[in-house]
Image (spheres, helix red, strand yellow):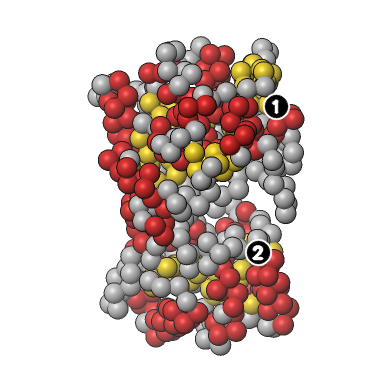
């Protein structure tokens, strides 16, 4: 059996402590699956003031050398829920105690480079603080992409220089672009400001530098790994991704089966599974009452749980509410984001009687009840690195209607007209394609319920946990160590 590895996850998010999107879900779940394989896995995140978890404060402070001098921090420690995986939190009040993760509402943080460079550099000093040298640093998106550059420069001749670096891209659109004049605060060498490093059209690009310097690169689905090599999906960095193509692997995200399980979910008014779906109908009726929709079994309930932004295609949904409701459906929307979409959904929610409701904001318990109650789930993303809601939906017997992109293409099997598949897919995002695909799904729901039932059962029985993903990451870590030092 291969020897266990020491892996340090370094990220800006980790559910349930701090989460803005799917990145937080991954960092909160994948380490537990890797630990179950026998690895010594630990997590480092900032100590945001929004975190309410109970922690233990280390007695000794920790100093992180940065361009302007040492940043003195405290280290707090807790565990991932239902596991022994340690989570360390870097506590620097000036940098992280702000009531948000990245930027304030309707604004931005001009010192985000310093904030997340300190987190990245802090990963090495945490190792010194603990007397623990990882085999692999696993970084996530632009906030911790600098880890690979630290490992290849000022840490190269230390014990940490033997560690491999794996960078996972959760969303290529966010690249961490900052003024080149801020480089000095990071303590990174100035020679990194070149075209095969940080330099990005005269600015400093953290993700670009991480792509060049990481030992290996992963994305969160095989299709997205192909899409980021194109002009449309690479957001200006496709040439870098293609240059590193031999070191790029697409690994599908999973879901936490302990949390997303319709047989045991405490947020649900009734429970069900693939063998007995009667509880799902009870969940539908209960949600209709909760949201003041007409309580009707004979009307398909279509759900949207999403950030409301262009990436998710929710602007198209907002523009199509009228045509969608004309199909004889009920529509439920949970999310927040784009103000125009919010206003449109709110207006329809007030004027459509018992046919449409919008909850602007987010509630985790309500998200669970919507996933359980809905018949169909609408997710027409312009791009989707992996996506999680289509996985949650399938686990709860709610059939997704998705645009065939990224992880949506990889995780939803097209209905074949005979009861095969797990959802409904379309290729090109437009008002017409969206409405016509929903029309198709609604027609099948009304006219061929036996096909819907077969698809629900197939979707609910699909393996979607983190076990398979963890085994693939185990292989990626070992490949990265072979590249870094010629073997494990």
> At 43% across and 68% down in the image, what residue appears?
402
79 left or right of 273 in image: right
Callout 2: SS: loop
> At 45% across and 73% down in the image, what residue appears?
429
67 left or right of 188 in image: right
Dot label at residue 338: 2
| Residue 197 showing in the rendered view | yes
Identify whether 283 is placed above or below 441: above
Residue 459, horizontal then vertical, whole percent: 37, 62
Identify whether 434 is placed above or below 198: below
Q: Looking at this view, is 359 or 283 the one in front?
A: 359
Q: Count residues near mark 2 (Cα–Cα under 10 Å), then give few for <14, some for 14-19, many for 20+.
A: some
397 left or right of 361 in image: left
Residue 94, horizontal then vertical, whole percent: 74, 30
> At 60% across and 74% down in the image, what residue appears?
318
Q: Count residues near mark 1 (Cα–Cα under 10 Å), then give few for <14, some for 14-19, many for 20+.
A: many
> At 52% across and 20% down in the image, what residue appears?
124
- Quadrant position of residue 197: top left
424 left or right of 118 in image: left
Callout 1: SS: loop
Q: Looking at this view, is 86 or 47 the one in front?
A: 47
Q: Quadrant of the N terminus?
A: top left
Mark with earlier residue (2, 1): 1
Identify whether 350 is placed above or below 253: below
Q: Which residue is mark 1?
A: 92
Residue 66, horizontal then vertical, whole percent: 62, 22
Residue 105, horizontal then vertical, whole percent: 73, 52
Identify whether 351 is placed above or below 222: below
Q: Quadrant of the C terminus?
A: top left
């Amino acid at each position: 059996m291969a020897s266990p590895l020491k892996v340090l996850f370094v990220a800006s998010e980790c559910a349930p402590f701090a989460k803005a999107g799917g990145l937080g879900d991954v960092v909160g779940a994948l380490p537990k699956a890797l630990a179950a394989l026998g690895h010594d896995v630990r997590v480092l995140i900032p100590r945001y003031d929004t975190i309410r978890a109970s922690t233990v404060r280390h007695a000794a402070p920790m100093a992180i050398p940065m361009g302007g001098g040492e940043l003195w921090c405290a280290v707090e420690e807790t565990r991932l829920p239902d596991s022994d995986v340690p989570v360390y939190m870097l506590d620097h009040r000036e940098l992280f105690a702000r009531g948000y993760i990245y930027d304030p509402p309707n604004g931005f943080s001009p010192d985000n480079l310093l904030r997340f460079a300190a987190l990245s550099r802090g990963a090495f000093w945490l190792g010194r603080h603990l007397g623990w040298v990882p085999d692999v640093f696993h970084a996530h998106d632009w906030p911790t992409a600098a880890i690979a550059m630290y490992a290849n420069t000022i840490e190269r001749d230390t014990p940490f220089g033997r560690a491999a670096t794996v960078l996972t891209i959760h969303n290529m659109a966010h690249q961490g672009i900052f003024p080149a004049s801020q480089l000095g605060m990071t303590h990174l060498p100035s020679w990194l400001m070149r075209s095969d490093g940080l330099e990005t059209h005269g600015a400093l690009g953290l993700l670009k530098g991480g792509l060049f310097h990481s030992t290996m690169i992963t994305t969160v689905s095989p299709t997205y790994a192909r899409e980021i090599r194109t002009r449309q999906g690479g957001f200006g960095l496709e040439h870098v991704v293609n240059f590193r193509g031999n070191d790029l692997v697409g690994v599908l995200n999973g879901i936490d089966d302990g949390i997303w399980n319709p047989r045991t979910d405490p947020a649900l008014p009734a429970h069900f599974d693939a063998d007995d779906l009667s509880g799902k109908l009870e969940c539908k009726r209960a949600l209709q009452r909760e949201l003041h929709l007409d309580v009707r079994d004979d009307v398909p309930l279509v759900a949207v749980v999403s950030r409301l932004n262009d990436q998710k295609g929710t602007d198209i949904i907002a523009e199509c509410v009228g045509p969608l409701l004309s199909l004889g459906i009920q529509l439920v929307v949970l999310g927040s984001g784009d103000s125009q979409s919010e206003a449109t959904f709110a207006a329809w929610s007030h004027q459509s009687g018992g046919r449409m409701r919008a909850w602007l904001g987010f509630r985790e318990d309500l998200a669970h009840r919507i996933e359980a109650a809905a018949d169909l789930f609408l997710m027409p993303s312009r791009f989707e690195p992996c996506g999680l809601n289509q996985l949650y939906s399938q686990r709860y017997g709610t059939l997704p209607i998705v645009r065939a992109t990224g992880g949506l293409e990889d995780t939803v099997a097209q209905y074949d007209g005979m009861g095969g598949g797990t959802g409904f897919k379309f290729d090109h995002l437009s008002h017409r394609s969206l409405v016509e695909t929903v029309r198709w799904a609604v027609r099948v729901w009304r006219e061929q319920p036996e096909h819907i039932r077969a698809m629900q059962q197939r979707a609910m029985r699909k393996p979607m946990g983190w076990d398979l993903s963890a085994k693939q990451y185990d292989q990626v870590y070992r490949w990265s160590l072979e590249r870094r030092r010629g073997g494990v």
